[in-house]
Image (cartoon, rainbow, N blue to C red):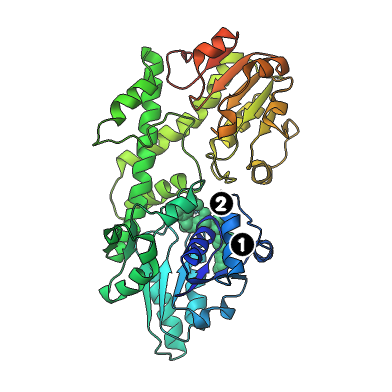
Amino acid sequence: MRVVMVGTGYVGLVSGTCLSEVGHNVACVDLNEEKIKLLKDGTSPIYEPGLENLIRRNMEHDRLTFTTRISEVLGNADVAFIAVGTPEGEDGSADVRYVEAVAESIGKLVERNLMVVVKSTVPVGTCDLVEETIQKQLAQRQSNVKVTVASNPEFLKEGDAIGDFMKPDRIIVGLNDPEGQAVFRDLYGPFVLDDQGKLLFMDRRSSELTKYGANSMLATRISFMNELSLLCERLGADIDKVRQGIGTDPRIGKKFLYAGPGYGGSCFPKDVAALLKTGEKNAVELEVLNAVTRANVAQKNRAADKIIAHFKDLNGKRIAVWGLAFKPGTDDVREAPAKTIIQKLLDQGAYVVAHDPQGQGNFAREFGDHERLVYADSSYEALRGADAMVLVTEWSEYRRPNWDKAADMMAGKVVFDLRNQYQSQELHDRGYHYECMGRPDSKLLS
Ligand SMILES: NC(=O)c1ccc[n+]([C@@H]2O[C@H](COP(=O)([O-])OP(=O)(O)OC[C@H]3O[C@@H](n4cnc5c(N)ncnc54)[C@H](O)[C@@H]3O)[C@@H](O)[C@H]2O)c1
């Protein structure tokens, strides 16, 4: 099939590339000229494991192209995806203006029957808006082209996005007219060869809400476990044992039960906020989600408060921070817990030396300059002269540090492990002060 993918970010670029990998002909469109220039040279503007090789291979086979102009590629398309950003607006609701702008361009330019697929995460009713926007343009130019609008939210995880797209757990498609199903069987057939039942068709509104429901459920699990970890600290219980005990119940399952410094990223915070707003607009109070948000804000602060409580006075202290991206495997730092933590440390007068294998550039751009914040070339370099190390993101290269080497480089032997990656005994044996999240050796916060 001939596919146009509008929006070449974390979702659009991975989706477009994977669709080309199974043989579709994909043209990716983005307004950002710098991104398109890099992509035309075969360079990925984002870090996602395996993506650059896949892009190059499909470009070489002439199945994947890049442009800044939708007008150059829409004429031939069977399917046009909208995968642009839907950031959090001022009042918490999702800002769909970029989606609307793409719909307007499609309405102005489309010359043959087309399936328009909204892949961005959008509030319920946005597909209706997209349809109206396109129909308005078609009516203005008295065109009788048939445009169908479908919802197809994306569930990939940054850091493992290619695996998720190539081997999906399910693909949700929202269509108001079942006639459109054939297009999706053709488009996604190669991804569900093992089980065609993974292609779940439903109405558009249910599909739009499914995405928010899924992300909000996952955020709820994280906030719940973080609160339980605080209780563990107070009671002398171990959150890792409790997690194993809970997660082995098949009704609950093992995933998304890890205590940490709070959830971040480009999706959970904004999607929870947007669903809360949807509830408010429809006079449904989503009390659970309100609590989930409050618990998450508290958790990010609590992580920093552990460090502040230990030193009492952070003025002039040098703190090494390992991990800036909101999770390992990505350079995405949007809403990353590291931002809250580093800001609080700086506010208390600390010097911060930060390291991240992929996220330093984005972090520096988004966080901005600060006279007491610097970046290190390597994780060990960040430790030089540090009074403490804080593990914020559990990149694999941080999982097994050489503690003797670290001790030689650090001024103080203090470790805050916000991801419960290290063994307390090992650190205690080497004379470190060690704190983690919700395990028995976590220092009680009064
Ligand atoms: N990042 C994730 O892990 C993830 C996962 C699932 C769903 N989503 C959802 O997918 C959507 C996209 O997210 P993302 O992380 O890929 O965003 P992103 O910010 O990485 O990329 C969006 C891209 O759209 C481009 N764009 C904006 N307006 C445009 C226009 N009119 N024409 C062409 N290009 C335009 C921007 O330049 C940008 O490159 C969001 O709704 C998000 O909530 C994201």
* Left or right of 360 in this view: 70: left
Residue 196 falls in which quadrant of the image? bottom left
Q: Is the CB of the residue bearing disc 2 within 8 angstroms of ligand 1?
A: no
The quadrant in which the N terminus is found is: bottom left
Residue 332 appears in the picture as rendered? yes
- Above-or-below relation of 342 to 79: above
Pointer 1 residue: 56
User: Which amino acid, mark 1?
Assistant: Arg
Q: Viewer-proximal residue, 116 or 351?
A: 116
Label 2: how many Cα within 10 Å (few below 14, some 14–19, many 20+): few
Q: Secondary structure at mark 2?
A: loop
- Mark 1 and mark 2 lie on one chain; the one further toward the N terminus is 2
Name the spot of residue 439 as percent of width and height, x first: 43, 18
Q: Residue at x 34, y 34 (%)?
A: 254
Q: Secondary structure at mark 1?
A: helix
Q: Viewer-proximal residue, 406 or 374?
A: 406
Residue 91 appears in the picture as rendered? no
Residue 50 numbered tag: 2
